[in-house]
Image (spheres, coloured by chain):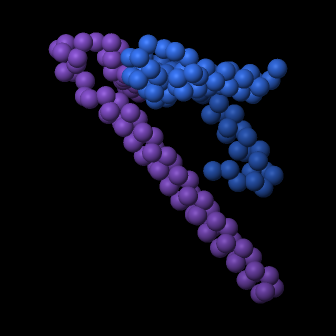
Chain colours: A purple, B blue
């Protein structure tokens, strides 16, 4: 059980670190870079700013597609089960 | 005032302020207008996502096991299972 504990703490800490890193990077990219001289070496650490819009949009669309497909698969599966049960009930009634 | 009303009014307020800035109805320095204002909604979404992830991570990090409560809970589940079985209900 102690093993699980350290693994959990590691996962939690890494989530925290990733979240902070993403936040800092994106904030600097979108809000601070416009005010920096275009010839400053810092600009080389960041891709052109068009990507600051494209990447979140692509991720949002991908996320929406994944959630939507998962939802539809679950609903189709449950409807199929319901239809099978209804058919079984009909067959049972006819038999008796 | 309900929570929904509160959230809705704050949302409307922020959206109207942003609309004023976005449509150029309020004079702003040019660099701000062309480079920063259009990006703000995306920044807000990314910041929100990062905040949620950080909150989750922090919760996972500071979560403490309670072995005593765990034992108690397992015992209670067994009791409930036995009682229900007497009344004819099967629980896994």
| Quarter residue B8 falls in | top right
Q: Position of residue B67 (x, y in %)?
A: 55, 22
Q: Is residue B19 left or right of residue B32?
A: right
Q: In this view, does B54 lie to the left or right of B3?
A: left
Of A71 and B6, the residue lying toward us: B6
Looking at the image, can residue A48 be seen? yes
| Quarter residue A32 falls in | top left
Looking at the image, can residue A2 be seen? no
Residue located at (57% from left, 63% from top)? A77
Q: Quadrant of the C terminus of chain A?
A: bottom right
| Quarter residue A82 falls in | bottom right
Of A1 and A79, the residue lying toward us: A79
Q: Where is residue A36 in the image (x, y as percent from the top left)?
A: 28, 12
Residue located at (68% from left, 50% from top)? B91
Residue located at (33% from left, 17% from top)? A34
Q: In this view, does A4 lie to the left or right of B86?
A: left
Q: Where is residue A49 in the image (x, y as percent from the top left)?
A: 31, 28
In the figure, A22 relative to B81: above or below?
above
Toward the bottom, the furthest residue is: A95
Q: Is residue A8 left or right of residue B77?
A: left
Of A25 and B11, the residue lying toward us: B11
Q: In which quarter of the image is the N terminus of chain A?
A: top left
Residue located at (46% from left, 49% from top)? A66
Q: Where is residue B75 in the image (x, y as percent from the top left)?
A: 65, 33
| Count of marks overlaid on the render | 0
């Amino acid at each position: 059980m102690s093993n699980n504990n350290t693994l959990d703490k590691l996962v939690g800490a890494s989530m925290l670190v990733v979240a902070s890193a993403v936040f800092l990077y994106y904030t600097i990219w979108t809000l601070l870079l416009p005010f920096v001289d275009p010839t400053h070496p810092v600009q080389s650490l960041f891709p052109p700013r068009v990507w600051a819009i494209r990447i979140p949009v692509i991720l949002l669309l991908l996320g929406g597609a994944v959630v939507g497909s998962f939802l539809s698969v679950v609903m189709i599966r449950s409807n199929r089960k319901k239809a099978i049960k209804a058919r079984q009930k009909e067959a049972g009634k006819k038999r008796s | 005032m309900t929570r929904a009303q509160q959230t809705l009014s704050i949302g409307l307020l922020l959206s109207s302020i942003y609309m004023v800035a976005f449509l150029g109805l309020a004079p702003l320095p040019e660099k701000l207008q062309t480079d920063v204002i259009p990006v703000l909604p995306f920044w807000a979404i990314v910041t929100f996502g990062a905040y949620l992830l950080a909150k989750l991570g922090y919760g996972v990090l500071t979560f403490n096991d309670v072995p005593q409560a765990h034992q108690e809970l397992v015992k209670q589940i067994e009791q409930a299972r036995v009682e229900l079985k007497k009344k004819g209900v099967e629980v896994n």
